[in-house]
Amino acid sequence: MFFSPHPVKKDAIIKEFYSLGTIVQFKAYGNKASQAIDKAIDKIKDIDNKMSVFKDYSELSKININAGKAPTKVGEDTYFVIKKAVEYSALSGGAFDPTIRPVVGLWGIQTDHARIPNNDEIDEAINLVNYKDIILDEKVSSIMLKSKKQELDVGAIAKGFAADEVKNIFKKNKIESAIIDLGGNIFAMGNKIDGTPWKIGIQDPIRSLGEFVGIVSVKNKSVVTSGNYERYFIRDGKRFHHIIDPLTGNPSEKGILSTTIVSDHSIDGDALSTCAFVMGLERGMELIESLKGVDAIFITENKMIYTTSGIKENFELLNNNFYYKN
Ligand code: AMP
Ligand code: MG
């Protein structure tokens, strides 16, 4: 008989806290799970301090304050996230655009001053949106926005980056099984402790939080969803959500309720879920199918579910309110 001198602890360590504008929950198995989670919490807070638009001392705010004036030196993490954001802006033909902040600020979604802006305000703000105005200087690790009043927002990609960073910390601490959940931006590390794949619920975009349309079975994958139910306000019976179409300056209206991306790296999944949402079913599907190792689940307003070819076997419908033809 074989006795391991250091058997892996069978109980999960779970910790929950608020950061990056959302509820973050870590669940990890392993002898060093508790220390690893504490290190991961520090990392998340550090990312929030560097990249939040709501903290005037963040690196991101410094770039925004210096817009049209001077380059801002930033650390490796912020530089990497903004560089990736620019790459996804180009890949999506501008459907994704981290200079969207002036428009997002106008709508004030999830603040106490949410409102419908008038057309003049929207036009003025849209004129400031252009990812091509982000001047990156890799040699000195500096970033500058070309014109005054331009502003960055990495809300559509930072959680993905953060999930990847947590996964790396967990890996260094020999954790082989974990769920990293940043408000629906999930990384399922390894398999479940019993060796079977993780089953990740895909939120029903119409019903309340925690009710699922289906589940996706994954091993060591990021599962990220962008949904119109995540942040929004309702006026005169109409929902105004947080994912803005840079062409119109309005919440994207392409008939999509949610897009989920399954990928190896969460930074890619986060950026692409927002890209796909704004691009809509046809163009979004085409983009995701063209990328190796990336899959998607689209849920539309007419209650249809569409998946890319690579994920059909791993997706199971749970809810008959939606129609899914496998
Ligand atoms: P996500 O939930 O990842 O799709 O990201 C949505 C968040 O990203 C919003 O709350 C905004 O802060 C920001 N955002 C909104 N529209 C866009 C867009 N078209 N491109 C990039 N970021 C956006
Ligand atoms: Mg995103």
Image (spheres, rainbow, N blue to C red):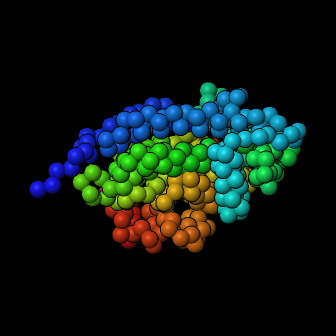
Is residue 124 something that shows in the picture?
A: no
Quadrant for the N terminus in the image: bottom left
Quadrant for the C terminus in the image: bottom left
The residue shown at (32%, 37%) is 13
Q: Nearer the viewer, residue 153 or 221?
A: 221
Q: Nearer the viewer, residue 302 or 158?
A: 158
Indicate whether 270 appears above or below 294: above
* Left or right for 99, reference 112: right
**Residue 156 locus on image (x, y percent):** 61, 47
Is residue 127 something that shows in the picture?
A: yes
Indicate the quadrant where residue 6 lies.
Answer: top left
Indicate the quadrant where residue 68 lies.
Answer: top right
* Left or right for 174, reference 100: left
The residue shown at (58%, 34%) is 46
* Left or right for 158, reference 223: right
**Residue 130 locus on image (x, y percent):** 78, 52
Indicate whether 205 appears above or below 288: above
* Left or right for 91, reference 296: right
The residue shown at (63%, 52%) is 252
Q: Nearer the viewer, residue 168 or 178?
A: 168
The residue shown at (37%, 59%) is 219
Number of on-image labels: 0
**Residue 7 locus on image (x, y percent):** 23, 46
